[in-house]
Image (cartoon, grey):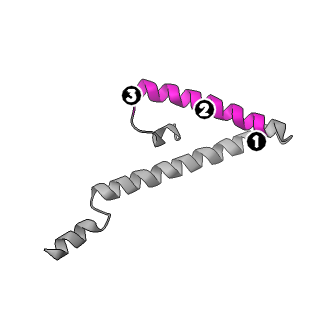
Amino acid sequence: MALIRLLPARGALTRLVLALATSLGLETLVATTLLEARAWSPSAVLSVLIAITLGAAALGLSSSSRALSLSRGGDGTAGRARSRR
């Protein structure tokens, strides 16, 4: 779900389907890549998936905090506009 939250808002069912498809596809891609590199192990696959999830969650948090800051006038332009009046 961390990756799906980075996409524009959609319906709940669409987000669920996208989350399941993305999860299965990503797990398959990571496992296949590690298998081809002869570095496959369950802990390696789990570590890569955790890193991807944490990265996506961090991106989601930074973009949501940026959006919240902008909605509260945190871009700095509101203060400058008031001071010019």
Q: How far apart are marks 2 and 1 (CA)?
A: 17 Å
**Amino acid type, mark 2:** Ser
**At x 51% / y 25%, what residue is drawn?**
17
Where disc 1 sits, the SS reads helix
**At x 48% / y 27%, what residue is drawn?**
16
Q: Can you give x and y, in whole percent of width and height, for residue 84 in the image?
A: 17, 75
Q: Mark 1 points at which residue?
A: 43
Q: Mark 3 points at which residue?
A: 11
Residue 33 position (above or below residue 14): below
**Amino acid type, mark 3:** Gly
Give yes or no for contact between labels 3 and 1 (Cβ–Cβ under 8 Å). Answer: no
Callout 2 environment at 10 Å: few (<14), some (14 to 19), or many (20+)? some
- Write the start and end of the magenta stretch as one range: 10-33
Q: Mark 2 points at which residue?
A: 23
Q: Can you give x and y, in whole percent of width and height, for residue 29 in the image?
A: 70, 34
Task: Single out the residue that lies furthest toward the bottom.
Answer: 84
Task: Single out the residue that lies furthest toward the right.
Answer: 38
First in sequence, mark 3 or 1: give its number.
Answer: 3
Q: Is the magenta stretch mostly helix, strand or loop?
A: helix
**At x 76% / y 41%, what residue is drawn?**
43
First in sequence, mark 2 or 3: give its number.
Answer: 3
**Amino acid type, mark 1:** Ser
Q: How far apart are marks 3 and 1 (CA)?
A: 34 Å
Q: Can you give x and y, in whole percent of width and height, for residue 14 in the image?
A: 45, 26
Residue 19 position (above or below residue 74): above
Residue 41 seen by the camera: no
